[in-house]
Image: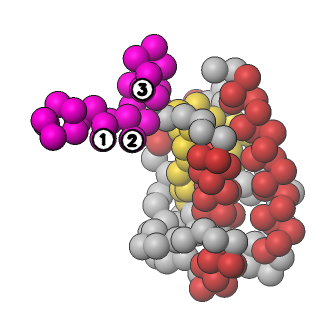
Amino acid sequence: MPTGVLLALLSAAAGEGSALTGQREPARQVVFVCEHGSAKSLIASLWFNRLARERNLALSSVSRGVEPDETVPAGVRENLRKDGLDVGDFTPARLTAADLAQAVSVVTIGADSPLFAGLGSASLERWSDIPPASTQYEASRDAMRQRIEALLERLVKNR
């Protein structure tokens, strides 16, 4: 296969290009932030990515922490596995200004950061009443999924 054709196929598979050429647009990114980047924001990000992919949307998300843990807690990892979501070798990462600069939306889940000061209210959403994922995983997941569905609808509507 010629290199140009292979690169075009790989680019299309990665979601790059434009709708006019039959290729997808680059994915717009949502940043989910929680205190440690290893539970609520990770759960939200994995569910967001799954639901966006199922709808064939050019949207993706990342999980970030204000004070990130070194690893994902075993209970969170196991509950995500039961939901069919693989954490793989994910390592929680610290929120950066670059993350926020690239985001179409930022969702903070019970965390605050001085980096939020520059964000407008239209791009920052606060989910402060999500149950703790460590002790109430299902309730936490379900509350976030409901909000993720609404967020996806808004992002599609506001393209």
Q: Nearer the viewer, mark 2 or mark 3?
A: 3
Let me know if residue 89 appears in the view: yes
Image location of residue 39, percent across then percent down? 64, 69
Which residue type does callout 3 highlight?
Answer: Gln
Q: Are marks 1 and 2 in contact (CB under 8 Å)?
A: yes
Q: Quadrant of the N terminus?
A: top left
Residue under the point 60% across and 36% down: 57
Q: Which mark is residue 14?
A: 2
Secondary structure under tag 3 reads: loop
Residue under the point 59% across and 46% down: 53
Secondary structure under tag 1 reads: helix
Looking at the image, is 59 positioned above or below residue 17? below
Which residue type does callout 2 highlight?
Answer: Ala
Q: Are marks 2 and 3 in contact (CB under 8 Å)?
A: no
Residue under the point 68% across and 45% down: 107
Local packing at callout 3 (Cα closer than 10 Å; few below 14, some 14-19, many 20+) is some
Q: Which residue is mark 3?
A: 23
Tell me the magenta residue range. 1-25
Q: Which residue is mark 1?
A: 10
Image location of residue 143, percent across then percent down? 85, 58
